[in-house]
Amino acid sequence: MNTLNHNSGDYDRVNLYDFFEDIRKTAMNSGYNLIVSNGIRGMKENFGSKNPIKLANKLIKYFIGFEEYEKCAELKRVIDKYKQSKIKKKKSYENTDLDTDKRRGKK
């Protein structure tokens, strides 16, 4: 594949490996930005993502390969925050059921 060098007016050969690696890196960074800005719940609700936690874990593996540990930590924090909110929601629901059972005389 060739691209036009605007400085010289000549065509230069493009290293396809580097070309596709740049595309991959851009896609991974876009995925990172989407998850960090929208959270796991936002990815499900706003974008219809079926398993954003799996996606986040794939991004973590990718960024480990480039030693971008700050991004890995941020993705992990987003996953943990989502899991914590699910636990709190479940406990709140269970407590509501217990309160209802107590009012009905059940134990």
Image (cartoon, rainbow, N blue to C red):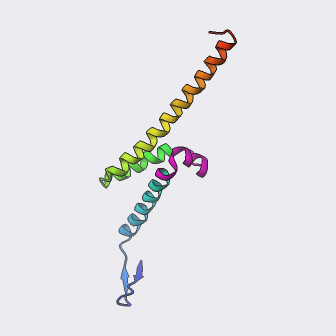
8 or 14: which is nearer to us?
Answer: 8
15 or 40: which is nearer to us?
Answer: 40
Q: Is residue 17 magenta?
A: no
Provide residue 79's location: percent of width, then percent of height.
45, 41
Residue 67 sits above or below residue 5 on the image? above
Q: What is the quadrant of the N terminus in the image?
A: bottom left
Residue 1 sits above or below residue 84 on the image? below
Q: Which residues are magenta?
A: 36-50
94 or 51: which is nearer to us?
Answer: 94
Residue at the limit of the structure toward the bottom, as seen here: 9
Q: Residue at x 52, y 30 (%)?
A: 88
> In this rendering, would 46 be left or right of 63?
right
52 or 82: which is nearer to us?
Answer: 82
Provide residue 102's location: percent of width, then percent of height.
64, 13
Q: Is residue 44 magenta?
A: yes
Residue 63 sits above or below residue 5 on the image? above
> In this rendering, would 57 be left or right of 98?
left
Q: Residue at x 39, y 47 (%)?
A: 74
> In this rendering, would 55 be left or right of 14?
right
Question: Which quarter of the picture shows residue 98?
Answer: top right
Q: Residue at x 35, y 73 (%)?
A: 15
Provide residue 12's location: percent of width, then percent of height.
36, 82
Residue at the limit of the structure toward the left, as seen here: 67
